[in-house]
Amino acid sequence: MPAKALPRIEKPVLLLCLFAPITSEYRELGAPGWSCDADLMKRSKTVPTNVHSLRPADIDIVASIGDSLTAGNGAGAEKGDALAIAIQYRGLTWSVGGDKSLDEHISVANILKKFNPNVFGYSIRTGSANVWETAHLNAGVPGAHSGDVKGQAEDLVRRMKEHPEIDYLNHWKLVHIFVGANDICSWCYRGVDEDGDHYRENIRKGVKYMQENMPRTIVVLSKMVDMSLLRRIDRAHEFCNRVHEFECNCEGNKTVTDETLSGICHSYMDKMREMQESGEFDTTDDFTLIIEPYLSMAEDIGRNEWKSTELFQPDGTPNMDFWAPDCFHFRAYGHAIVAKNLWKNMMQPVGGQSAANLTDDGEPPLCPDESCPFIRTTKNSDDCKPYIQ
């Protein structure tokens, strides 16, 4: 089932639609044998009618919206293979990547498969967004800005309505959104068109479209990372520094100070929080929006560590197991680590989510809370009792 092309394709060298076998020449992170208490793994006794009563096993459909990170650019690249950044390894992405099993690779989709083996929509292998056989409900397009969220939402609605295996009105859907890096990368020369207010309104339009056209949906929006953190990597890796000057003009623009770059990123983050706190998307029982702050709270990203007594500190060099060869996109290992942090936030009450730990701390994915065994929302975080069946 073909999907229509989406707008704003801006970096041709990174947007090649290439098809390649999945290579095993990269570090992986799985969760072998992971499970939770049997009662927590079950679906609800009856299909929930309220989005705040959704157990993980109640999710029937997974989908995603975003840019090249959602498309999985470079996720399966071998170290040093910069050309592989152009390949979209959709099956390895942290939100809806469905290659392998959870034993071998952590993704939110692979975790959900443990709760519901019939979950549908996750992406596999490599390919572009308009190739249904691999993309499925991963609508992410390299180069996408926040202004493309509504178009991708429209595309998802069409795909879901047209697919015979999707009960559009009755299946519960989880849609993940991650977007904003390309907005930041062009913000310093596009000015007010890429400010926090425009960013918020762009995403709001997309989420509003889903609220009005996609019943039984929980939208999970990951806050963006402070992109000034990438400059720590630039200082330690000349190749990545030069690539960033091309890939992300404003991050690579040395006339933009670290404080200014961090400030615009945090402006975007604040606007995300405002959107959740507005209550606009908590007006019906079958739809909600949750903002997950794990990446925005990270104090460092993808750097190696050295050990001094009991203290671990970054030594400044990029961890090339975490990063694709451009130090901008994630490799499979980075996607798995980010996935574990996203899932952890989804299981934590809103307002009590933890910052991302972007190293492998050895902890397994978090199980649902026995006292509130749902994907956490603003309402069941305030008081879970009304939503327990």
Image (cartoon, helix red, strand yellow):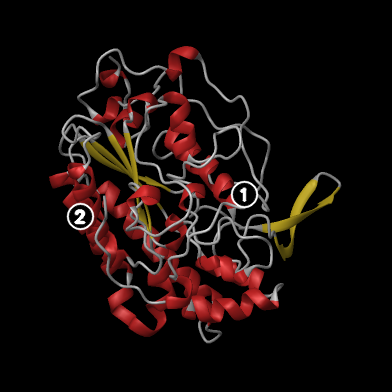
| Disc on the earlier residue, 2 or 1 | 2
Under circle 2, the secondary element is: helix
Q: Can I make out residue 353 in this image?
A: no
Residue drawn at point x = 50 percent, y = 82 percent: 256
Q: Position of residue 36 (x, y in %)?
A: 52, 20
Count the labels in the image.
Answer: 2
Vertical comparison of 252 with 211: above or below: below
User: Which residue carries the number 1 mark?
Assistant: 333
Instruction: Identify residue for label 2.
Output: 154
Image spot of residue 4 (x, y percent) = 24, 60
SS for dot 1: helix
Q: Residue furthest right?
A: 309
* Residue at image location 30% in from the left, 17% down from the top: 388
At a point 17% along the width and 38% down the height, the residue shown is 215
Q: Quadrant of the C terminus?
A: top left
Crowding at mark 2 (Cα within 10 Å: few <14, some 14-19, many 20+): some
Residue 289 in the image: x percent, y percent? Answer: 28, 44
Q: Position of residue 181 (x, y in %)?
A: 43, 66
Amino acid type assigned to the residue bearing label 2 in the image: Glu
Q: Which mark is residue 79?
A: none
Q: What residue lies at 63% left-to-right and 66% top-to-bottom?
A: 325
Q: CA distance from mark 2 to mark 1?
A: 31 Å
